[in-house]
Image (cartoon, grey):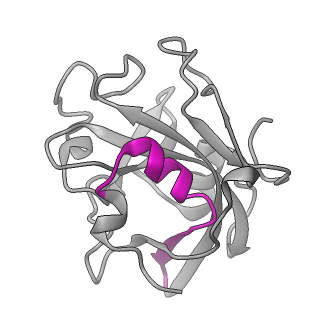
Amino acid sequence: MKKLNRDFFAKDTETVAKELLGKVLCRKKDNKIYRGLIVETEAYTQDDPACHAFGGISRRCESLFKKPGTAYVYLIYGMHHCVNLVTDKEEYGSGVLIRALEPLEYVENSNGPAKLCKSMDITKKLDGCDTMQEDSPIWIESGLIIKDKDIIQTTRIGISKAADLRRRFYIKNNKWVSKK
């Protein structure tokens, strides 16, 4: 499989969220490459009250304002990591949360953003990684092309602000989706 380039991520966030379905999240650690098929995503943009970038750039979310394809890793509830990939353009805070993976290589239960980060050992240490770099420990590879008819678009999970926005996407009938 081929590593995705910056142009893939330098598009409208919702478009990237849909197009990431079927792609492969990769994590190199201890001479192993962990791989999982992306089956569920959520889109967040700085004009969205649920986005960490909504209030502008801060220490917590500065990675969201970097080049498209940068990893933004953060903690929720003080103990669980989540990973986003920056989209659109530099200096505009937007990204796609990877919500669930179908395990491919060395990945265990990944039907939720915290579970997938735990399974792939994605932590704050990876925040700000440019996935385009040759030696990046995290990147996205091409995989399947999912047809529009096989993509479900619905509201996001676990948020209270802008909860009515239909910015969650998942592959229809995939058993690894976190919540149908």
The image quarter in which residue 3 lies: bottom left
Q: In the rendered view, would you say 127 is above or below 159?
A: below
Q: In the rendered view, would you say 9 is above or below 134?
A: above
Residue 27 counted in the magenta span: yes
Q: Which residues are magenta?
A: 10-30
Q: Position of residue 1 (x, y in %)?
A: 54, 86
Q: How many marks?
A: 0
Front in this rendered view, residue 99 or 19: 19
Quarter of the image with the C terminus is top right
Residue at image position (25%, 76%) is 133
Q: Position of residue 9 (x, y in %)?
A: 34, 59
Residue at image position (39%, 40%) is 74
Front in this rendered view, residue 113 or 150: 150
Q: Position of residue 126 (x, y in %)?
A: 35, 58
Q: Position of residue 66 (x, y in %)?
A: 19, 50
The image quarter in which residue 156 lies: top right
Residue at image position (51%, 72%) is 26
Residue 66 counted in the magenta span: no
Front in this rendered view, residue 36 or 67: 67
Q: In the rendered view, would you say 58 is above or below 3?
A: above
Front in this rendered view, residue 36 or 124: 36
